[in-house]
Amino acid sequence: MLQVEQLKKSFDGFQAISDANLLVPKGEVVAVIGPNGAGKSTLFNLITGHLQADSGHIRFQGKEITSMAPYKICHRGMARSFQLINIFSSLTVFENVQASVIAKHRLDQNFFRPAKKLFIEETLEILDSFELFDFKDRSCSALSYGDQKVLEIAIALGSKPELLLLDEPTAGMSSEETRRIVNLIKHLSREKGLTILLTEHDMELVFDVAQKIMVLHQGKTIAQGLPQDIRNDKSVQNAYLGETG
Ligand SMILES: Nc1ncnc2c1ncn2[C@@H]1O[C@H](COP(=O)(O)OP(=O)(O)OP(=O)(O)O)[C@@H](O)[C@H]1O
């Protein structure tokens, strides 16, 4: 579904991504891991078009998307959540998800559908499946941090993506909130068949949910494969030992 090949990106001469390679097969959960500053967020920003690559290729569903505008990539079926929560806090929970549903239909140019009714039903369906229905009329700022994160994923799902990118989805969460996100990722993957690419520092979570893992170290892909192979990979162990001591 997604292929990244020999991707490079530098900031003022600093090579943040020097040789990133990634394969995300359809229907799988793939995790990108790596020590702090390895380039995980930069890689995500390149994939979603929020940053322009210096060289290399990104292909999504067989088509080249390297350096394409984010809204065009989104229209092709990719959605993301950010490390920092990215919602309209002055709007209600319902309005936030509805805005994303409406944006999707606008892009599809489905102007002649019975718009309002359809959007309401679709929005309520999403809220229900994310256990946010009871909060639909609340202002987003009144939600707990965990609920805001779930809402952010619900907003991303409003555009009906084929591929969902989650950048550190459990950062700053309690263990109970983390469990909820883990269950949500498993549900979206197993029941909805969604392809998911995530970055995470919580290794327990990564090895629990990911079918494949890619390891980024100093901007370079040093390993990619099944969790058990990554666990036993000497270069991966060295990269992490190098960071911790
Ligand atoms: N806009 C930018 N300008 C200059 N340097 C940047 C910029 N964005 C990222 N970097 C640098 O690129 C490197 C990779 O950063 P990035 O945030 O992608 O790493 P990360 O793996 O996501 O880190 P973390 O796990 O701490 O979130 C870092 O050294 C960072 O300081």
Image (cartoon, rainbow, N blue to C red):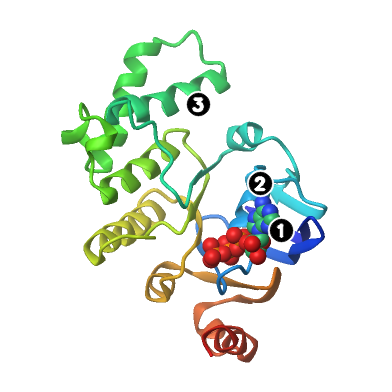
Residue 240 appears at what percent x and percent y? 56, 84
* Ligand 1: image quarter: bottom right
**Neighbours of disc 2 within 10 Å: few (<14), some (14-19), many (20+):** some
**Neighbours of disc 3 within 10 Å: few (<14), some (14-19), many (20+):** some
Query: Going by the image, does 53 lie left or right of 143?
Result: right
Q: CA distance from mark 2 to mark 3?
A: 18 Å
Residue 43 in sight in this render: no
Residue in the picture at 58% in, 57% down: 41
Secondary structure of the residue carrying tag 1 is: strand
Q: From the viewer's perspective, is the residue at label 2 or at label 3 nearer? A: 3
Q: Nearer the viewer, residue 90 or 214?
A: 90
Q: Residue furthest front?
A: 12
Residue 227 appears at what percent x and percent y? 50, 78
Q: CA distance from mark 2 to mark 1?
A: 12 Å
Residue in the picture at 35% in, 18% down: 118
- State whether label 2 is within 8 Å of ligand 1: no
Q: Nearer the viewer, residue 210 or 200?
A: 200
Instruction: Determine which quarter of the picture holds residue 238.
Output: bottom right
Q: Amino acid at mark 2?
A: Gln
- Report which residue position mark 3 lands on: 104
Indicate which disc, 1 or 3, sits on the residue closer to the N terminus. 1
**Neighbours of disc 1 within 10 Å: few (<14), some (14-19), many (20+):** many
